[in-house]
Amino acid sequence: MLMEKEIQDKLVAFICESFMVEPDEFNLEESLVDQGVIDSIGLVEISAFIEETFGIKVAETDMTRHNFGSVKKMVAFIVSKNG
């Protein structure tokens, strides 16, 4: 099972590569949408990445601020689904 740090590193690498930002350009504790890093289409891309990379089915009902409100929240979501 992947550790939170590994999950976070994979997510950050994907976000940086896909949305052309550097890791120090966004806060892991804050909404990527609110920070202007991604839009709603970006959320769909991230959910597809999570499904492919971590083997998790992301339902439409999972796409909430509680689960996808920040990188840290996405990591917690992935950990909870893998648990």
Image: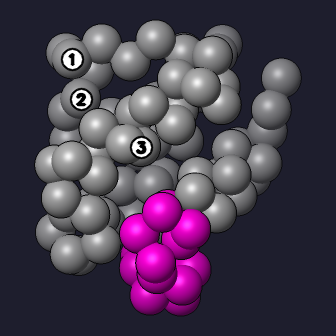
Q: Are marks 2 and 1 in contact (CB under 8 Å)?
A: yes
**Callout 3 environment at 10 Å: few (<14), some (14 to 19), or many (20+)?**
some
Give the magenta range: 15-27
Q: Position of residue 4 (x, y in %)?
A: 70, 43
Q: Specify the amino acid type for callout 2.
A: Met
The quadrant of the image that shows the N terminus is: top right
Q: Which of marks 1 and 3 is nearer the N terminus?
A: 3
Instruction: State whether residue 82 is above or below residue 53.
Output: above
Pointer 1: what residue? 60
Q: Can residue 45 be seen in this view?
A: yes
Q: Specify the amino acid type for callout 3.
A: Ile
Is 50 covered by the magenta stretch?
no
Is 23 covered by the magenta stretch?
yes
Q: Residue at x 45, y 55 (%)?
A: 71
Q: Which mark is residue 46?
A: 3
Pointer 2: what residue? 63
The quadrant of the image that shows the C terminus is: top right
Q: Specify the amino acid type for callout 1.
A: Glu
Report, in whole angstroms, how far the alpha carbon at label 1 lies from the one at label 3. Answer: 13 Å
